[in-house]
Image: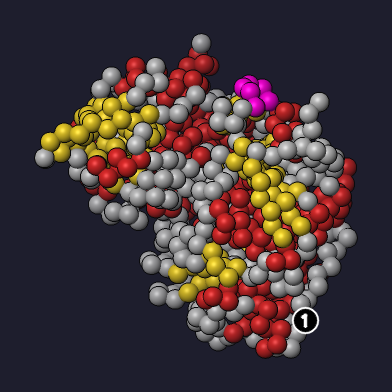
Amino acid sequence: MKPLNVTQKLINDHLIEGKLAPGEEIGLKIDQALLQDATGTLVQLELEAMNLDKAKTEVAVQYVDHNLLQTDFKNADDHAFLHSAAQKFGLWFSRPGNGVSHPVHMERFGKPGKTLVGSDSHSCAAGSLGMLAIGTGGLDVAAAIAGQPYFVKMPQVMGVKLTGKLPDWVSAKDVILEMLRRHDVKGGVGKVIEYYGEGLKDLSAMDRHVIANMGAELGATTTVFPSDQETKRFLKSQGREEDWTELIADEGCSYDLHDHIELDKLVPLIALPTSPGNVVPVSEVAGKSISQVVIGSSANPGLRDFWIAGAIVKGKSVNPDVSFDVNPTSRQIIQNMIDTKAFANLITAGARFHQSGCMGCIGMGQAPASGTISLRTMPRNFPDRSGTKDDQVHLCSPETAAASALTGKITDPRDIASLYDMKYPKFEDPELHIINEDMLVAPAEDGSKVTLKKGPNIKSLPHIEALQSDYEVPVLLKMQDNISTDEILKAGAEVLPFRSNLPEISKYSYTVIDETFYDRAMATKEKTGGHIVVAGDNYAQGSSREHAALAPKYLGQVAVIAKSYARIAWQNLVNFGILPLEFENPDDLDKIEQGDTVMLKNLRQLVEQRETIEVLIKKETGEVAIPTKHSLSDRQIRVLLKGGIINDFKEKLSA
Ligand code: MIC
C-alpha cells in the first residue's frame, strides 16, 4: 500500500462518503464534539429543533468560556440553559470559570487518532494531539452530535518540515506568526497543514497546540501533528497515558504542497493591526509606547506560556503606564501556576489576574484605552474586536509581551537580556500536572427527564423559507477583500449576550462597516423581500459563528456574490439557505455598486443544473449582465433549495 501521511491516515480511517480527491466533498465519521457557550446556545437550540434524544458521538462537551461577564441576567440564564441542555442531550458540561474549551479539551478528553468537530474556529487546536479536529458552524456540529457525517471539501495537504531548534527568546507563537507572514490569512484555505521533521522533537504538545490553534488564522481546514513520544509524555502528565496511541507518517509518504521552516533562523515576530497576517519582526516596531499587555487565550494556553512570562517579570515591576492582564486558561492551569511559583511571580510584578476564560480575546472586557497600543498573545486583531474603536491590537509571543510589559514599549525580548542582565529562563515541565476535574459535570443517565431552562432572552429559531426562483433585490453593501466575521457580526460584551436571541443580535449585522445596515435591510425586507451583498476575496474569514450567516438571513439576505469565501463561512451560508455565488470574472466586482438593483431569474433550476447564473445589474445608467457560478456539492444544493439544514433534517425525520 502507498505510504500515507498522518492526515491521509486520519481521513481514511473516518471516511464514510466521497473520494480522496482534493476539492471534492467527503463525509467523515465524527468521534468527538466540542461546543463553547457563545456558539453553543444556538447549537443546543438546533438539537432541540432536531428532537435529539442523546448525543451519538463518543464524547461531546459543552464549555462555557466566552460569555463570562454577568452584567445582567442574560449570560447567567444562558449558562443555566446550557447546563440543562447538556444534561438533556448527553453532553459533558464544563462549568463557567473552568477554562477555555481547547486547552481543557486537550487536557481532559483529546485522543490521538480521533476526529473532532467544534463550534469554534480554533477547534483545530486538538490537531496538536494527532487528531483530525475541525472548527465549523454550529449546525454542522449539531448534525455530527446527532450522528450525521461531517461534510467538507477534501483538502490538499501541505507538509511543513521543521528542522533545527528554536533560539532563546523565540517560541511556538513565532512559528505560527512566521507561517502567517509567509501565507497570510487565506494561504491555508482548502488545506490541511501537517507538520513533520526532526524540529518537532523540541516542540512540546502545548507548543504544538499554539501552532495548531492559529492554523485557523491561515484559513486552513485544520492542522495536524503526529502522535509521538511527546504526545505520550503530555498525556501521561495529565494522568491519561492509556489514551495514547502512536500515529506517525509512513516513511516515503508525500504531500500535495511543501514548506520548510528552519526553527533556528526564526526571530521574535509580531502581527500589526488589524490582521493576524500583518506580520513583521518585533525589532521593526520596537520602541512604540504601549498601554496594555494581555497574556492568555487558547492561542497561548499552556503552563509554559504563563511560567515564562512570570520568570521574565520575576522580582521586577511592570511599567507604571501598562495594564498587565493575565487570563489563565483554566482552573487547572491556575493550580499549576501556583505550584510552580509562576502565579506569585506575576502577581508580585503587578499583573491583574482575571478568571479563566477567553475574556478580552472575544472582547468580553479588557478593552484598551483609546488611541493606544495593546499587545496580546491572542489569535486575532480584527478591527474593533477589542471593544475600542480604532483599536491598535498587536499579536505576539508571551516573551515579547512580558518584556514589553516591563519597559512600557514594544520590546524585542532578546534585548531584555542585556537590559536586565538575565538569561533566557528554562522551563521544566512537571512530570505530573495537578489535575482538576471538579467542574466537569457528566451527562445525565436519562436525559428525557430533564427540562430545558430557558430565560427570557433565549428565543427559539425562526422558520427559514426555501429559496425562490426569481428575485429583484438591492445590493445593500459592497465590501472588499478579507472581511472578517467580526465585521459582519461584532464580537464583544455588548453583542455576545444576544447570541441566543436572533431578532436582537441581527440589529448588529455589519455595523462595524455601516451603521445604517439594519434599518436599510428591514425596510428592504418589507419592500422587495430581501437583499444581496457583494464582496472581494476570502469573505467572512475568522470565526465559526453562524450568527454571521443567520442574522443576515433573518434580515432577508438571499445571496452573497464574492470573489471567494472562507471555508466555514461558505458552509454556514448554505446551512442557513443563503446562496454563495462566485464571480466568473473576479474583476466584475468593480461593475457593481451599492444601491444597484439585482435581478435573479430561474435561480432554483440554474443552481440545480450547475449552469452559469447570469446576474442582471440594473443601474441608473443602464443594465449590466454579470456571469456567476457556485461550487456546491449535490448535498448542499439539496439543503440550500430547502432553506437550510434544519428544514432538510426535519424533512428526513418526518419521511
Ligand atoms: C473567535 O475567536 O472569533 C471566537 C470567538 O472563538 C469564535 C467563536 C465565536 O464567535 O463565538 C471562533 O473562532 O469561532
Q: Is residue 603 magenta?
A: no
Q: Position of residue 204 (x, y in %)?
A: 78, 58
Q: Position of residue 29 (x, y in %)?
A: 67, 27
Q: From which residue to which does the magenta span run? A: 15-20
What residue is drawn where x is 52% and y is 59%?
276
What residue is drawn where x is 84% and y is 47%?
228
Q: Position of residue 351 (x, y in %)?
A: 63, 77
Disc 1 element = loop
Give left or right: position of 575 versus 188: left
Q: Which residue is mark 1?
A: 423
Give left or right: position of 205 versus 568: right
Nearest the eye: 517 or 434: 517
Nearest the eye: 116 or 192: 192
Crowd class of label 1 (few under 14; some 14 to 19; many from 20; radius 10 Å): few
Colour style of the rendered protein structure: secondary structure
Nearest the eye: 493 or 231: 231
